[in-house]
Image (cartoon, rainbow, N blue to C red):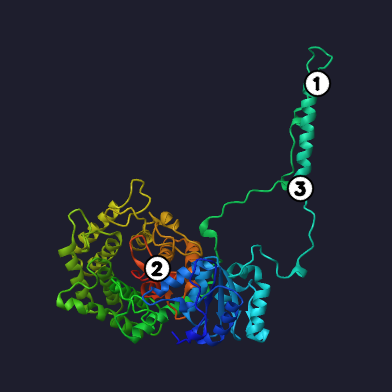
């Protein structure tokens, strides 16, 4: 963070009343500080990131501050739009339906995604207004009704800022249905009168019957206000799908991102180390997925692709030499995908070492992780069989059987599949995520389609669609997982559901970072129903799955869908 002279500026607002959130690039601080100081002096409550304290989770704190703010003031500049973090703040504010006021600090050429989001918003330009004071004057004048709730001395009643622009008061209009309704009352009264009094003076003579049509009063349909139709939550921000050329370009950028990271050094971290130093339990999985994406893609020459794939795989199999199982003991997904990636690499460039390393991994799984009732269990706080582990192991064992003809691998694949089938509930409409779990995971349903060509749970997983076209990781989480979205896109393509695939890919492309990477989530951070954390940094596996899904490339087949 750029050093700031906090002694010469006001203290950020810390209370619970409505306030303005300031989103800016620290390179622009000199200009931004003068503008927000003027706003503060005019009585507005302002929060900016000097309000963070030591020891806080700054990503979470920023997210909370955006959620609680009344107005989101975005200072757009050439440096702002090149900052993934700044752009993420802006996207997050829109996702939370905040009132966004964009201010152009310089002659910035807005990228399409920001232009699209702000096209109908009154953008203020510092250059056009000529001075910082003129900008603040215009902001406080034009947007007074918007900013007033954030004033420390806010009047009890909102006062319009420009009375001369308000239309003259008009007499209230009668609703269109008043006249027909009045007519109905008169007719009904007449009916009652003749019914009751028509026999007066006539003894017991019954009243003459009236035609049924007289008793029915029809109000024209167009005069009756129609009840608003309920809008599904997922459709609130439904955006059009992107053109194939745009998606192709996004996939190319994703592959370049993975290739460049491999060239900079291995093993790859779960998230781009330039953005976050975070490693993770699934680092082996992320590296194996990167290898599969690069191997299946068309980024660079075949020799360069194999060179990077070899670097990634060699770094992951180094631990095998000392008898260790690569990856975290609590998950078998990493070793399973690594074994599958080694066997796919052998298809592209035959290598005894690839096959031997894959065989070592799978033999150790059979020897130490087999379950008597079928499937294979990881070693965590308690032995547990998960759907994801066994789906991947089933594919890896099948590939090894095809390579070696050894029936023990065929039996192991069948054992994994037996366990997977046991995870169906009574109605057979989806797969549970593992032993004793009631969680409905998008990953599980998508992998069943991708690895087993089984659409059992795809309809259930489609219900995890969230606003903006992305998917939640499970039925207990509201936020989006970009990897889950990419997996769903791949599953849709596998099942021939092209329209659904295109929508999911478009959501991923819109969230793609300028580096080419796909973030873990569309919010600063979140935790899913299994306690896994996701961050808005470029994720290795999410990027790999996006590249594979956009191309429609099944990494375990020699054809493109």
Give left or right: position of 330 versus 531.
left
Identify the secondary structure beneath mark 3: loop
Which residue position is annotated with label 3?
176
Identify the secondary structure beneath mark 1: helix
Q: State the residue at coordinates (18%, 60%).
A: 370
Task: Find residue 483 and name its label.
Answer: 2
Tell me which label, 1 or 3, sits earlier in the chain.
3
Q: Residues within 10 Å of mark 1 (few under 14, many from 20)?
A: few
Measured Cα–Cα span from mark 2 to mark 1:
78 Å
Tell me which label, 2 or 3, sits earlier in the chain.
3
Task: Find residue 161 and name its label.
Answer: none
Indicate the quadrant containing the N terminus: top left, top right, bottom left or bottom right. bottom left
Q: Position of residue 480 (x, y in %)?
A: 44, 65
Extreme right residue here? 201
Please tell me whether mark 2 or mark 1 is closer to you in this view.
1
Measured Cα–Cα span from mark 1 to mark 3:
33 Å
Tell me which label, 2 or 1, sits earlier in the chain.
1
In the image, 73 versus 5, the foreground residue is: 5
Measured Cα–Cα span from mark 2 to mark 3:
52 Å
Task: Find residue 197 and name its label.
Answer: 1
Q: Position of residue 101 (x, y in %)?
A: 60, 74
């Amino acid at each position: 963070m750029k050093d700031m002279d906090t002694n010469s500026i006001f203290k950020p607002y810390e209370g619970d009343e409505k306030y303005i959130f300031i989103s800016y690039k620290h390179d622009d601080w000199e200009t931004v500080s003068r503008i927000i100081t003027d706003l503060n002096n005019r009585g507005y409550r302002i929060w900016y990131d000097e309000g963070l304290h030591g020891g806080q989770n700054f990503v979470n704190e920023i997210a909370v501050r955006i959620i609680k703010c009344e107005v989101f003031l975005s200072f757009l500049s050439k440096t702002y739009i090149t900052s993934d973090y700044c752009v993420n703040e802006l996207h997050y504010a829109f996702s939370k339906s905040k009132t966004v006021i964009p201010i152009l600090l310089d002659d910035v050429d807005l990228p399409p995604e920001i232009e699209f989001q702000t096209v109908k918003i009154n953008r203020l330009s510092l250059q056009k207004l000529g001075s910082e004071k003129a900008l603040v004057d215009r902001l406080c004048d034009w947007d007074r009704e918007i900013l007033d709730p954030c004033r420390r001395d806010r009047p009890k009643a909102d006062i319009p800022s420009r009375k001369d622009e308000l239309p003259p008061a008009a007499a209230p209009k009668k609703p269109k249905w008043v006249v027909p309704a009045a007519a109905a009352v008169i007719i009904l009264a007449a009916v009652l009168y003749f019914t009751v009094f028509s026999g007066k003076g006539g003894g017991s003579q019954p009243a003459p019957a009236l035609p049924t049509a007289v008793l029915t009063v029809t109000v024209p349909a167009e005069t009756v206000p129609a009840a608003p139709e309920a809008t599904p939550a997922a459709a609130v921000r439904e955006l059009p799908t992107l053109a194939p050329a745009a998606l192709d370009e996004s996939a190319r950028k994703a592959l370049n991102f993975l290739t460049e990271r491999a060239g900079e050094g291995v093993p790859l971290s779960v998230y781009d180390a330039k953005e976050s130093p975070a490693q993770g339990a699934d680092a082996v999985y992320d590296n194996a997925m990167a290898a599969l994406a690069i191997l299946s893609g068309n980024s660079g020459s075949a020799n360069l692709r194999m060179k990077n794939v070899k670097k990634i795989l060699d770094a992951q199999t180094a631990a095998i030499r000392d008898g260790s199982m690569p990856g975290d003991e609590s998950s078998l997904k990493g070793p399973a995908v690594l074994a599958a990636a080694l066997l796919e690499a052998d298809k592209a460039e035959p290598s005894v070492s690839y096959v031997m390393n894959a065989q070592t991994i799978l033999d150790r799984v059979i020897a130490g992780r087999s379950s008597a009732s079928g499937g294979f269990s990881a070693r965590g706080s308690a032995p547990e069989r998960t759907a994801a582990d066994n789906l991947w192991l089933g594919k890896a064992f099948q590939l090894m059987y095809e390579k070696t003809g050894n029936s023990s691998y065929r039996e192991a694949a069948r054992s994994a599949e037996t366990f997977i089938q046991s995870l169906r509930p009574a109605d057979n409409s989806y797969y549970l995520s593992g032993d004793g779990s009631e969680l409905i995971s998008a990953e599980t349903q998508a992998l069943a389609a991708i690895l087993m060509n089984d659409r059992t749970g795809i309809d259930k997983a489609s219900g995890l669609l969230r606003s903006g076209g992305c998917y939640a990781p499970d039925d207990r989480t509201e936020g989006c997982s970009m990897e889950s979205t990419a997996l769903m896109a791949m599953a849709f393509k596998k099942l021939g559901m092209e329209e659904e695939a295109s929508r999911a890919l478009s959501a991923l492309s819109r969230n793609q970072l300028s580096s080419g990477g796909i973030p873990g989530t569309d919010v600063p951070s979140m935790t899913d129903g299994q306690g896994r954390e996701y961050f808005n940094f470029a994720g290795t596996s999410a990027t790999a799955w996006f590249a594979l899904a956009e191309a429609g490339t099944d990494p375990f087949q020699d054809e493109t869908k």
